[in-house]
Image (spheres, rainbow, N blue to C red):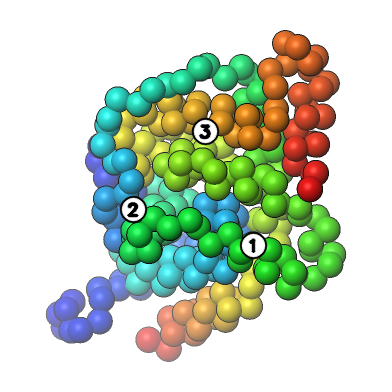
Amino acid sequence: MSGAFRGPGAGSTPAENDEEEEVGAEVSPLVVDAVGRALQRHFQAIAEMPLPDRLLVLLAELEARERTS
Amino acid sequence: MTDDGGAPKRPAQTKEFRESLIREMKDLRAFAVSLSGSFHQADDLLQETLLKAWSNSGSFIPGTNMRAWLVTILRNTYYSQYRKRGREVPDTDGIYSSRLATPPNQESSVDMSDFQNALLKLAPEHRDVLLMVGASGLSYEEAAEICGVAVGTIKSRLNRARGRLADLLGIKDASDLGIGSVSEAVVRAHSSG
Protein backbone atom coordinates (compact mmCIF):
# COMPACT_ATOMS: atom_id res chain seq x y z
CA MET A 1 0.00 0.00 0.00
CA SER A 2 1.65 3.21 -1.13
CA GLY A 3 -0.73 5.58 0.62
CA ALA A 4 -1.41 7.49 -2.58
CA PHE A 5 -4.87 8.49 -1.44
CA ARG A 6 -3.96 9.39 2.10
CA GLY A 7 -5.33 12.88 2.19
CA PRO A 8 -5.04 15.37 4.98
CA GLY A 9 -6.39 14.09 8.23
CA ALA A 10 -5.81 10.50 7.19
CA GLY A 11 -6.01 8.36 10.24
CA SER A 12 -7.67 5.42 11.77
CA THR A 13 -11.19 4.60 10.70
CA PRO A 14 -13.44 1.84 11.98
CA ALA A 15 -12.20 -1.69 11.47
CA GLU A 16 -9.05 -0.64 9.70
CA ASN A 17 -7.28 -3.86 10.29
CA ASP A 18 -7.32 -6.84 8.05
CA GLU A 19 -9.42 -8.84 10.42
CA GLU A 20 -10.84 -12.04 9.11
CA GLU A 21 -14.33 -11.08 8.03
CA GLU A 22 -17.01 -13.53 7.25
CA VAL A 23 -17.78 -13.32 3.57
CA GLY A 24 -21.41 -14.25 4.10
CA ALA A 25 -23.59 -16.09 1.64
CA GLU A 26 -22.78 -15.35 -1.98
CA VAL A 27 -25.30 -12.84 -3.32
CA SER A 28 -26.72 -13.82 -6.70
CA PRO A 29 -25.72 -11.70 -9.72
CA LEU A 30 -29.33 -10.64 -10.31
CA VAL A 31 -29.66 -9.37 -6.77
CA VAL A 32 -26.28 -7.63 -7.04
CA ASP A 33 -27.54 -5.97 -10.20
CA ALA A 34 -30.89 -4.94 -8.68
CA VAL A 35 -29.26 -3.51 -5.55
CA GLY A 36 -26.68 -1.74 -7.70
CA ARG A 37 -29.32 -0.07 -9.84
CA ALA A 38 -31.35 1.03 -6.82
CA LEU A 39 -28.18 2.48 -5.28
CA GLN A 40 -27.27 4.36 -8.44
CA ARG A 41 -30.76 5.82 -8.77
CA HIS A 42 -30.57 7.04 -5.17
CA PHE A 43 -27.07 8.45 -5.67
CA GLN A 44 -27.84 10.14 -8.98
CA ALA A 45 -30.99 11.76 -7.62
CA ILE A 46 -28.87 13.53 -4.99
CA ALA A 47 -26.00 14.30 -7.38
CA GLU A 48 -28.43 16.02 -9.75
CA MET A 49 -29.54 18.51 -7.11
CA PRO A 50 -28.01 21.97 -7.32
CA LEU A 51 -25.25 22.64 -4.80
CA PRO A 52 -26.45 24.62 -1.77
CA ASP A 53 -25.67 28.33 -1.72
CA ARG A 54 -23.26 28.11 1.18
CA LEU A 55 -20.96 25.83 -0.82
CA LEU A 56 -21.17 28.02 -3.91
CA VAL A 57 -20.32 31.04 -1.75
CA LEU A 58 -17.38 29.20 -0.21
CA LEU A 59 -16.09 28.19 -3.66
CA ALA A 60 -16.37 31.77 -4.88
CA GLU A 61 -14.50 33.02 -1.80
CA LEU A 62 -11.70 30.51 -2.30
CA GLU A 63 -11.42 31.46 -5.96
CA ALA A 64 -11.33 35.16 -5.08
CA ARG A 65 -8.64 34.58 -2.44
CA GLU A 66 -6.61 32.71 -5.04
CA ARG A 67 -6.73 35.65 -7.44
CA THR A 68 -5.68 38.23 -4.86
CA SER A 69 -2.88 36.24 -3.20
CA MET B 1 10.31 32.79 2.86
CA THR B 2 9.64 29.74 4.91
CA ASP B 3 6.72 27.40 4.65
CA ASP B 4 5.71 27.56 8.28
CA GLY B 5 4.81 31.15 8.85
CA GLY B 6 1.68 30.25 10.78
CA ALA B 7 -0.52 29.47 7.79
CA PRO B 8 -0.63 25.91 6.45
CA LYS B 9 1.61 25.18 3.52
CA ARG B 10 -0.40 25.84 0.43
CA PRO B 11 1.08 25.75 -3.02
CA ALA B 12 -0.90 27.60 -5.64
CA GLN B 13 -3.45 25.31 -7.27
CA THR B 14 -3.46 24.75 -10.94
CA LYS B 15 -6.52 25.59 -12.97
CA GLU B 16 -6.94 21.86 -13.59
CA PHE B 17 -6.96 21.17 -9.86
CA ARG B 18 -9.65 23.75 -9.21
CA GLU B 19 -11.77 22.65 -12.13
CA SER B 20 -11.65 18.96 -11.22
CA LEU B 21 -12.42 19.81 -7.60
CA ILE B 22 -15.54 21.73 -8.61
CA ARG B 23 -16.54 18.98 -11.02
CA GLU B 24 -16.45 16.41 -8.21
CA MET B 25 -18.58 18.41 -5.76
CA LYS B 26 -22.00 17.07 -6.72
CA ASP B 27 -21.01 13.41 -6.66
CA LEU B 28 -19.15 13.99 -3.42
CA ARG B 29 -22.29 15.51 -1.95
CA ALA B 30 -24.28 12.42 -2.96
CA PHE B 31 -21.62 10.32 -1.23
CA ALA B 32 -21.79 12.47 1.92
CA VAL B 33 -25.59 12.44 2.09
CA SER B 34 -25.72 8.67 1.58
CA LEU B 35 -23.01 8.07 4.17
CA SER B 36 -24.39 10.35 6.87
CA GLY B 37 -28.12 10.19 6.15
CA SER B 38 -28.42 13.94 6.58
CA PHE B 39 -28.22 16.79 4.09
CA HIS B 40 -27.21 19.14 6.87
CA GLN B 41 -24.35 16.96 8.07
CA ALA B 42 -23.36 16.21 4.48
CA ASP B 43 -23.03 19.91 3.67
CA ASP B 44 -20.92 20.47 6.80
CA LEU B 45 -18.72 17.57 5.71
CA LEU B 46 -18.50 18.90 2.17
CA GLN B 47 -17.55 22.35 3.38
CA GLU B 48 -14.80 20.99 5.60
CA THR B 49 -13.58 18.67 2.85
CA LEU B 50 -13.44 21.53 0.38
CA LEU B 51 -11.40 23.68 2.79
CA LYS B 52 -9.02 20.82 3.57
CA ALA B 53 -8.62 19.91 -0.10
CA TRP B 54 -7.99 23.52 -1.02
CA SER B 55 -5.37 24.12 1.67
CA ASN B 56 -3.71 20.74 1.12
CA SER B 57 -3.71 20.72 -2.66
CA GLY B 58 -0.01 19.88 -2.53
CA SER B 59 -0.78 16.43 -1.18
CA PHE B 60 -2.84 15.56 -4.25
CA ILE B 61 -0.72 13.59 -6.69
CA PRO B 62 -1.55 14.71 -10.25
CA GLY B 63 -2.54 11.79 -12.41
CA THR B 64 -4.22 9.93 -9.54
CA ASN B 65 -7.97 9.82 -9.05
CA MET B 66 -9.16 13.07 -7.48
CA ARG B 67 -12.45 11.47 -6.49
CA ALA B 68 -10.58 8.88 -4.40
CA TRP B 69 -8.53 11.64 -2.79
CA LEU B 70 -11.64 13.67 -1.92
CA VAL B 71 -13.51 10.63 -0.62
CA THR B 72 -10.50 9.92 1.63
CA ILE B 73 -10.66 13.41 3.13
CA LEU B 74 -14.44 13.40 3.54
CA ARG B 75 -14.52 9.93 5.04
CA ASN B 76 -11.79 10.72 7.57
CA THR B 77 -13.64 13.89 8.54
CA TYR B 78 -16.87 11.94 8.95
CA TYR B 79 -15.33 9.23 11.10
CA SER B 80 -13.53 11.66 13.34
CA GLN B 81 -16.86 13.41 14.00
CA TYR B 82 -18.56 10.05 14.40
CA ARG B 83 -16.05 9.00 17.04
CA LYS B 84 -16.38 12.30 18.88
CA ARG B 85 -20.13 11.83 19.10
CA GLY B 86 -19.58 8.44 20.67
CA ARG B 87 -21.07 6.32 17.92
CA GLU B 88 -24.56 7.58 18.48
CA VAL B 89 -27.23 6.83 15.93
CA PRO B 90 -26.68 9.09 12.90
CA ASP B 91 -28.83 12.20 12.73
CA THR B 92 -31.38 11.03 10.23
CA ASP B 93 -33.87 13.76 11.08
CA GLY B 94 -31.90 16.06 8.86
CA ILE B 95 -32.87 14.20 5.76
CA TYR B 96 -36.54 14.86 6.34
CA SER B 97 -36.21 18.48 7.36
CA SER B 98 -33.99 19.07 4.31
CA ARG B 99 -36.56 17.45 2.11
CA LEU B 100 -39.25 19.67 3.52
CA ALA B 101 -37.15 22.69 2.71
CA THR B 102 -36.51 21.43 -0.81
CA PRO B 103 -38.47 23.01 -3.67
CA PRO B 104 -41.32 20.73 -4.80
CA ASN B 105 -39.87 20.10 -8.25
CA GLN B 106 -36.72 18.79 -6.64
CA GLU B 107 -38.41 16.76 -3.98
CA SER B 108 -40.60 14.89 -6.40
CA SER B 109 -37.56 13.40 -8.10
CA VAL B 110 -36.16 11.84 -4.97
CA ASP B 111 -37.95 9.71 -2.45
CA MET B 112 -34.99 8.51 -0.52
CA SER B 113 -36.40 7.64 2.85
CA ASP B 114 -36.72 3.86 2.36
CA PHE B 115 -33.46 3.41 0.54
CA GLN B 116 -31.55 5.80 2.80
CA ASN B 117 -32.96 4.17 5.91
CA ALA B 118 -31.83 0.79 4.62
CA LEU B 119 -28.35 2.20 3.91
CA LEU B 120 -28.14 3.54 7.46
CA LYS B 121 -28.86 0.11 8.87
CA LEU B 122 -25.65 -1.22 7.33
CA ALA B 123 -22.48 -1.21 9.41
CA PRO B 124 -20.64 2.03 8.56
CA GLU B 125 -17.64 0.17 7.15
CA HIS B 126 -19.97 -1.79 4.88
CA ARG B 127 -21.99 1.26 3.85
CA ASP B 128 -18.94 3.27 2.88
CA VAL B 129 -17.43 0.47 0.81
CA LEU B 130 -20.72 0.01 -1.02
CA LEU B 131 -20.87 3.74 -1.73
CA MET B 132 -17.25 3.93 -2.85
CA VAL B 133 -17.39 0.99 -5.23
CA GLY B 134 -21.09 0.72 -6.09
CA ALA B 135 -21.93 4.40 -6.48
CA SER B 136 -18.76 6.50 -6.75
CA GLY B 137 -17.12 4.10 -9.18
CA LEU B 138 -13.88 3.63 -7.24
CA SER B 139 -11.96 0.43 -7.91
CA TYR B 140 -11.55 -2.35 -5.33
CA GLU B 141 -7.91 -1.33 -5.10
CA GLU B 142 -8.73 2.32 -4.46
CA ALA B 143 -11.29 1.37 -1.79
CA ALA B 144 -8.74 -0.98 -0.19
CA GLU B 145 -6.18 1.83 -0.15
CA ILE B 146 -8.64 4.27 1.41
CA CYS B 147 -9.82 1.83 4.10
CA GLY B 148 -6.37 0.45 4.76
CA VAL B 149 -7.51 -3.14 4.28
CA ALA B 150 -6.85 -5.91 1.76
CA VAL B 151 -8.78 -6.10 -1.51
CA GLY B 152 -10.32 -9.37 -0.29
CA THR B 153 -11.77 -7.55 2.73
CA ILE B 154 -13.33 -4.96 0.41
CA LYS B 155 -14.93 -7.73 -1.63
CA SER B 156 -16.36 -9.45 1.43
CA ARG B 157 -17.70 -6.17 2.85
CA LEU B 158 -19.28 -5.40 -0.49
CA ASN B 159 -20.91 -8.80 -0.63
CA ARG B 160 -22.30 -8.48 2.88
CA ALA B 161 -23.51 -4.93 2.24
CA ARG B 162 -25.37 -6.01 -0.90
CA GLY B 163 -26.90 -9.06 0.77
CA ARG B 164 -28.10 -7.08 3.78
CA LEU B 165 -29.44 -4.26 1.62
CA ALA B 166 -31.34 -6.77 -0.53
CA ASP B 167 -32.89 -8.25 2.64
CA LEU B 168 -33.84 -4.83 3.97
CA LEU B 169 -35.38 -3.77 0.67
CA GLY B 170 -37.15 -7.07 0.15
CA ILE B 171 -35.21 -7.88 -3.00
CA LYS B 172 -35.39 -11.63 -3.45
CA ASP B 173 -33.34 -13.93 -5.58
CA ALA B 174 -34.75 -14.19 -9.08
CA SER B 175 -34.90 -17.98 -8.94
CA ASP B 176 -38.39 -17.94 -7.44
CA LEU B 177 -39.61 -14.63 -8.83
CA GLY B 178 -38.50 -14.46 -12.41
CA ILE B 179 -36.19 -11.80 -13.80
CA GLY B 180 -38.91 -9.16 -14.22
CA SER B 181 -39.96 -9.41 -10.62
CA VAL B 182 -36.52 -8.50 -9.34
CA SER B 183 -36.60 -5.03 -10.78
CA GLU B 184 -40.22 -4.62 -9.80
CA ALA B 185 -39.30 -5.53 -6.25
CA VAL B 186 -36.61 -2.86 -6.32
CA VAL B 187 -39.00 -0.27 -7.66
CA ARG B 188 -41.51 -1.16 -4.99
CA ALA B 189 -38.89 -1.12 -2.25
CA HIS B 190 -37.46 2.14 -3.50
CA SER B 191 -40.65 4.04 -4.08
CA SER B 192 -42.97 2.82 -1.37
CA GLY B 193 -43.50 4.70 1.85
Question: Crowdedness of circle 1 by 10 Å Cα count: few (<14), some, many (20+)?
Answer: many
Q: Which mark is residue B161?
A: 3
Q: Which mark is residue B95?
A: 1
Question: Crowdedness of circle 3 by 10 Å Cα count: few (<14), some, many (20+)?
Answer: many
Q: Quadrant of residue B2?
A: bottom left
Q: Is residue B3 above or below residue A46?
A: below
Chain at tag 3:
B
Q: Is residue A46 above or below residue A67?
A: above
Q: Is there a contact, CB below 8 Å, between mark 2 and mark 1?
A: no
Q: Is residue B121 above or below residue B93?
A: above
- Pointer 1 and pointer 3 on the same chain: yes
Q: Is there a contact, CB below 8 Å, between mark 3 and mark 2?
A: no
> Which badge, 2 or 1, is on the more N-terminal residue?
2
Viewer-proximal residue among B57 and A69: B57
> Which badge, 1 or 3, is on the more N-terminal residue?
1
> Which badge, 3 or 2, is on the more N-terminal residue?
2
Q: Which mark is residue B61?
A: 2
Q: Which SS class for mark 3?
A: helix
The span from disc 1 to disc 3 (Cα, nearest Å) is: 22 Å
Q: Which mark is residue B179?
A: none
Q: In which quarter of the image is the N terminus of chain B?
A: bottom left
